[in-house]
Amino acid sequence: MAEDTPTDAMADAAGMASALPGPIGAAGKAISIAAPFIQGEPKPPEGHFTFSPEELDKIIAEWEDLRSALDSDEQKAMHMTNIQPPGNDFASSDFSNSANPSGDGFLRAIEKMIDYVDKYIEALKDAREKIATQDEQANSEITKAGGVEV
């Protein structure tokens, strides 16, 4: 049977602590993640994404679909910002006075989502363009080096 290392002991203790409710459990979870690195074990490699231009086109299309759905939501939200009281009584006025600020908040939230999605789509399109440019440059260099048309 293998001997427990200090890292194993720390991870076991953190695992037990993470089962507890509240801040102790949260601390246990954080320790169990950090324990191996505290003991000097190598960190896992940092991640990155790799996409082909075709994959990026599909991802961009999905984000553009989301953008279209947000346009529809924005139109609906605009109706929520101009609610008129159904009657001339206090309850009706009170309702519209409460509903309109809520609609304004909802509209602002959707507008922020639209802004985020627009920027993300633009970043994806920029990435696609950079990939295409790099591919063209690589093909050009290969053609120059080998005298072969690619």
Image: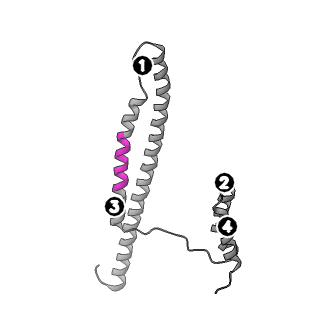
Q: State the SS at label 3.
A: helix
Q: Is 83 in the magenta?
A: no
Q: Which residue position holds label 1?
A: 85
Of badges 2 and 3, nearer the viewer stands: 2
Image height check: is 116 above or below 123? above
Of badges 1 and 4, nearer the viewer stands: 4
Q: Nearer the viewer, residue 8 or 146?
A: 8
Q: State the SS at label 4.
A: helix
Residue 132: x and y, percent?
36, 67
Q: Which residue position holds label 3?
A: 57
Q: Are marks 1 and 2 in contact (CB under 8 Å)?
A: no
Q: State the SS at label 2.
A: helix
In space, the residues marked 1 and 2 are separated at their CA atoms by 46 Å
Residue 16: x and y, percent?
66, 66
Q: Amino acid at mark 2?
A: Gly
In the picture, the quarter occupied by the N terminus is bottom right
Q: Amino acid at mark 3?
A: Asp
Residue 103: x and y, percent?
45, 32
Instruction: Count every numbered label the image shows and give the total.
Output: 4
In space, the residues marked 1 and 4 are separated at their CA atoms by 58 Å
Q: Which residue position holds label 4?
A: 14
Q: Which residues are magenta?
A: 61-72
- The local crowd at label 2, few if under 14, some if 14 to 19, many if 20 or more residues have their Cα within 10 Å, is few
Answer left or right for 81 relative to 143: right
Q: Amino acid at mark 1?
A: Pro
Residue 136: x and y, percent?
35, 71
Q: Amino acid at mark 4?
A: Ala
Q: Earlier in the sequence, mark 2 or mark 3?
A: 2
- The local crowd at label 3, few if under 14, some if 14 to 19, many if 20 or more residues have their Cα within 10 Å, is some
Q: Is 66 in the magenta?
A: yes
